Image (cartoon, rainbow, N blue to C red):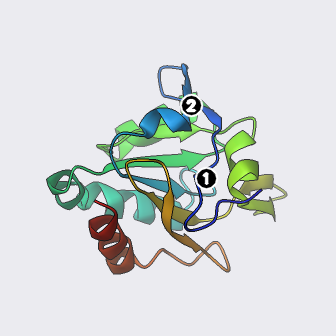
Amino acid sequence: MAAEVGKPAPDATVINADRQAVKLSSLRGKPAVLAFFPGAWTGVCDKEMCTFRDSMARFNAVNVQVVGISVDSPFALKMFAEQYSLNFPLMSDFNREAIRAYGVVLPEFVAGMKEVSQRAVFVLDKDGVVRWKWVADVPRNEPPYDDVEKAVKAAS
């Protein structure tokens, strides 16, 4: 079942940069932004993650955590985060559990890459309820960052 506004966010296990399993439900306790993206080093994804990086002061000011999620390996995501000095965690959904649970599977991406994440953003309140969602029609579209910030403030 896909993640829907007003419903509890689906739970899934992802892998952090230290190769440890993390349940998304462990994020409960404070609001969260889950930013799903197709793949590291793919132009628009780089820009999106850097935009979230540059906005972290505003998210921190309202005690909101940001997590980036893609199907890239934890090794690749660690290098990607280091290259762009990302100041929030990136999680690997290598087994595609989270993208299936959230209903954001992109069947085919570039160069024959299959089953990556659609570009999508979910804002969760501190209890893990989806308060806002956005899913790109096509991967080249970036999220409406102003709307993300409004949703974050409303969920805080």
* Image quadrant in which you'd find residue 61: bottom left
In the depicted view, which residue is nearer to us: 124 or 16?
Answer: 124
Mark 1 vs mark 2, foreground winner is 2
* Label 1, residues with CA under 10 Å away: few <14, some 14-19, many ≥20: many
User: In the image, is 120 to the left or to the right of 111?
Assistant: left
Residue 156, position as x, y percentages in the image: 28, 59
Q: Which mark is residue 88?
A: none
Residue occupying image coordinates x 55% and y 66%: 6
Residue type beneath disc 1: Gly
Relative vertical location of residue 121 with respect to residue 136 in this rendering, above or below: above
For mark 1, give the secondary structure: loop
Residue 59, position as x, y percentages in the image: 24, 57
Residue occupying image coordinates x 20% and y 51%: 60
Residue 74, position as x, y percentages in the image: 57, 30
For mark 2, give the secondary structure: strand
Residue 139, position as x, y percentages in the image: 64, 72
Residue occupying image coordinates x 54% and y 19%: 20
Query: Where is mark 2, residue-wise?
Result: 23
User: In the image, is 155 to the left or to the right of 92?
Assistant: left
Which comes before the other along the chain, label 1 or label 2? 2
Residue type beneath disc 2: Lys
Asked whether residue 127 is in view, the answer is: yes
Residue occupying image coordinates x 53% and y 70%: 133
In the depicted view, which residue is nearer to us: 97 or 153?
Answer: 153
* Label 2, residues with CA under 10 Å away: few <14, some 14-19, many ≥20: few
* Residues at marks 1 and 2, CA–CA distance in whole angstroms: 21 Å
User: In the image, is 92 to the left or to the right of 111?
Assistant: left
Q: Quadrant of the N terminus?
A: bottom right
In the depicted view, which residue is nearer to us: 74 or 60?
Answer: 60
Q: Which mark is residue 39?
A: 1
Number of numbered discs overlaid on the protein picture: 2
